Image (cartoon, rainbow, N blue to C red):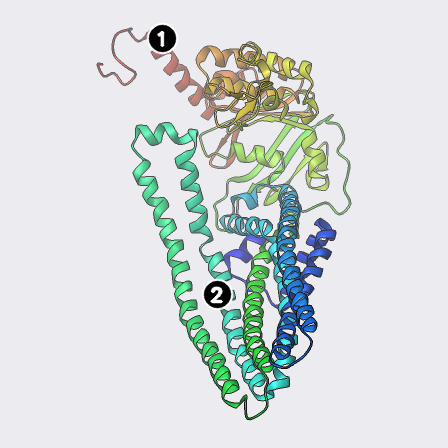
């Protein structure tokens, strides 16, 4: 069962799993803040002992007050009692500080370990699995509050110490009443544990609604969607959908709160009746059974202390239980197996000398999905350019994903000079590949850093970055920005200047961003394989011609795979592969395919006719649809 399926299926962790989660949480805290953890444990012990010491000190002081004796003894006892109060107050403040420090250190390490694990998922499958994304969100919440688990554990220890002391104190006065008070705690414990499990299951159940709510909130506040939302008046509609998701989550929380209110109300009433009955009993029988004023004060303090400690134990136990149930999501992701099988005996990847071969490759995203590729046999010769053409959805981009090993073929193999790429560490394979994707990233970084994302070794290397920008035809654009290559390409953030005056960045046009993405790919122009997925999408005719001219220069003598719908850009490719109906239907160079008169020739003729028609159309006030303005 996958990481995502476990979350979707609502699998309940057993006691062993909870023990494992608790152990890993404690180890996480110990690795993050060992000194603070020791200090916090000492304060927890002190916090458990101080109430008992205070109760017995109060008894002694009261008994001394009602019986004759030296005044100095009473003063000394009063000073001691005051010191106990001071120690309790100071330790409480110190405990809060240490808890905050533990939370910060644990949160940082937990977040780093979580995203290190996420980074280790080499493929894309899990990031396209809604159940996994829901579990990941819960894991992030658990990582942020991992330190609270230790706080709860130490809280259990503190309450246990206090409970032990007060139970012993109460038993000295009335063993029967002590048994009644302790027995009343067990129903509360059972109710709290059941409630904690229900609440943890509810968090999993409302996960999709929570993620949708965050999605809509982000959609309403980002510049990417701002134009359409405002032009089309989508704000109220999207806000309504966001509120619907929040209402669904709130309804689940409200139902849980109402259940807990009813049960907790009954338990609180029972606790109050026991406490009140005990107080009446001690006051009625105090004189007859020889109880002193101090004994009465200890009884009252012990009764309240036992109930408080029991209530704290029950509540903290339930809270710890719920935290461990949620922390199990963190444990599951951090300890998840690789999403792509790792080779048992890894082979080194030789420099590409012959070519890449796809042998009877079939692929679909899951057993429930249709086939995207069927029986693909393709040879990509070393040093040659291969163009993939076909209708949208034909499987061209999926084939590229397989070459990058974002997925493994469902059936068949992909061989690099005869080596199955599944037998090679995926990081080594990707080091040999350069690419620009149609859905490239526009990072909210400086222009220089945006280009350097193509090869982190280029960070700070001005000559390499500018050289790549020149190849992509975007150097002059970036150099002319307010701060040159150091200008932020975003208006979402601001960078601090020398005089602490925030510098707001700039935004690029779609075509300029396309060239930045190309520059990113050109940093890897020395790689064995260059993948170009719609590299000129969104460019005007002049820019498109310029880009493809530059690409031809870069691709010359190199192994490259080009995906494009602009068939004029693939005429010079060494091999043109036509994919239709999830299969390869034609392959050859441009003259061969045109002579064959098949699918490629028809598509090329249609595009060419469109351009000829556009050139021959009279220039008047008609728009492209033929309607008058």
Q: Residue at x 57, y 59 (%)?
A: 323
Q: Quadrant of residue 5?
A: bottom right
Could you tell me which secondary element the residue under label 1 belongs to? helix
The image quadrant where one finds the N terminus is: bottom right
Q: Is residue 231 above or below residue 12?
A: above
Q: Is residue 575 above or below residue 84?
A: above
Is 73 positioned to the left or the right of 274 in the image?
right
Q: Residue at x 49, y 19 (%)?
A: 506
Is 302 positioned to the left or the right of 268 in the image?
right
CA neighbours of label 1 inside 10 A, class few (<14), some (14 to 19), many (20+): few
Q: Are marks 1 and 2 in contact (CB under 8 Å)?
A: no
Residue 85, given in percent of the width and then of the height, sits at 63, 63
Residue 57, given in percent of the width and then of the height, sits at 65, 73
The image quadrant where one finds the C terminus is: top left
- Label drawn at residue 549: none
Viewer-proximal residue among 255 and 598: 255
Q: Residue at x 31, y 35 (%)?
A: 234
Q: How many marks?
A: 2
Q: Is residue 37 above or below residue 410?
A: below
Q: Is residue 21 in view?
A: no
Q: Which residue is mark 1?
A: 615
Q: Is residue 394 in view?
A: yes
Viewer-proximal residue among 105 and 586: 105
Label 1, label 2: how far apart the Cα atoms are: 69 Å
Viewer-proximal residue among 539 and 246: 246
Q: Which residue is mark 2?
A: 198
CA neighbours of label 2 inside 10 A, class few (<14), some (14 to 19), many (20+): few
Q: Residue at x 50, y 56 (%)?
A: 8
Outermost left residue: 628
Viewer-proximal residue among 84 and 134: 84
């Amino acid at each position: 069962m996958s990481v995502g399926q476990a979350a979707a299926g609502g699998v309940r962790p057993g006691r062993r799993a909870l023990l494992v989660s608790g152990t890993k949480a404690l180890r996480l805290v110990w690795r993050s803040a060992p000194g603070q953890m020791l200090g916090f444990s000492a304060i927890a012990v002190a916090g458990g002992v101080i109430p008992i010491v205070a109760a017995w000190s109060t008894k002694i002081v009261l008994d001394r007050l009602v019986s004759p004796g030296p005044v100095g003894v009473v003063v000394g006892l009063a000073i001691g009692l005051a010191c106990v109060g001071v120690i309790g107050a100071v330790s409480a403040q110190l405990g809060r500080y240490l808890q905050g420090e533990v939370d910060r250190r644990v949160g940082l390490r937990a977040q780093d370990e979580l995203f290190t694990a996420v980074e280790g998922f080499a493929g894309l499958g899990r990031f396209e699995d809604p159940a996994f994304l829901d579990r990941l969100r819960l894991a992030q919440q658990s990582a942020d509050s991992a330190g609270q688990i230790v706080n709860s554990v130490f809280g259990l220890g503190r309450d246990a110490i206090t409970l032990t002391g007060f139970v012993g104190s109460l038993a000295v006065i009335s063993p029967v009443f002590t048994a009644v008070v302790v027995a009343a705690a067990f129903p509360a414990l059972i109710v709290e544990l059941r409630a904690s499990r229900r609440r943890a299951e509810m968090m999993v159940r409302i996960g999709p609604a929570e993620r949708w709510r965050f999605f809509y909130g982000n959609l309403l506040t980002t510049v990417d969607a701002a134009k359409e939302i405002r032009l089309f008046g989508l704000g109220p509609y999207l806000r309504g959908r966001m509120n619907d998701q929040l209402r669904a989550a709130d309804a689940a929380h409200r139902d849980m709160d109402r259940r807990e209110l009813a049960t907790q109300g009954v338990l609180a009433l029972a606790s109050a009746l026991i406490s009140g009955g005990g107080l009446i009993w001690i006051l009625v029988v105090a004189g007859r059974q020889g109880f002193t004023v101090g004994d009465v004060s200890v009884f009252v303090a012990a009764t309240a202390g036992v109930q408080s400690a029991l209530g704290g134990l029950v509540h903290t136990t339930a809270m710890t239980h719920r935290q461990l149930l949620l922390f199990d999501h963190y444990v599951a992701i951090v300890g998840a197996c690789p999403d792509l099988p790792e080779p048992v005996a890894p082979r080194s990847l030789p420099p590409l000398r012959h070519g890449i071969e796809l042998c009877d490759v079939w692929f679909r995203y899951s057993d429930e999905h249709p086939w995207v590729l069927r029986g693909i046999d393709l040879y990509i010769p070393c040093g040659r350019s291969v163009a993939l053409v076909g209708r949208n959805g034909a499987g061209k981009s999926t084939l590229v994903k397989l070459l990058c090993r974002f997925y493994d073929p469902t059936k068949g193999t992909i061989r690099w000079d005869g080596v199955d790429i599944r037998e090679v560490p995926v990081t080594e394979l990707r080091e040999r590949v350069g690419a620009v994707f149609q859905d490239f990233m526009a990072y909210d970084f400086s222009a220089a850093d945006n280009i350097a994302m193509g090869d982190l070794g280029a960070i700070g290397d001005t000559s390499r970055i500018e050289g790549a920008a020149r190849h992509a035809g975007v150097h002059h654009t970036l150099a002319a920005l307010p701060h040159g290559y150091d200008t932020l390409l975003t208006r979402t953030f601001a960078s601090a200047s020398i005089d602490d005056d925030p510098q707001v960045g700039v935004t690029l046009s779609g075509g300029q961003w396309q060239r930045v993405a190309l520059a990113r790919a050109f940093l890897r122009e020395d790689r064995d394989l260059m993948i170009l997925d719609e590299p000129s999408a969104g460019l005007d005719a002049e820019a498109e011609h310029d880009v493809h001219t530059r690409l031809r220069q870069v691709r010359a003598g190199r192994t490259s795979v080009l995906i494009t719908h602009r068939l004029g850009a693939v005429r010079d490719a060494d091999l043109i592969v036509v994919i239709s109906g999830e299969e390869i239907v034609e392959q050859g160079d441009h003259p061969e395919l045109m002579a064959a008169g098949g699918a490629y020739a028809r598509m090329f003729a249609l595009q060419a006719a469109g351009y000829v028609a556009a050139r021959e159309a009279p220039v008047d006030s008609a728009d492209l649809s033929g309607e008058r303005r």
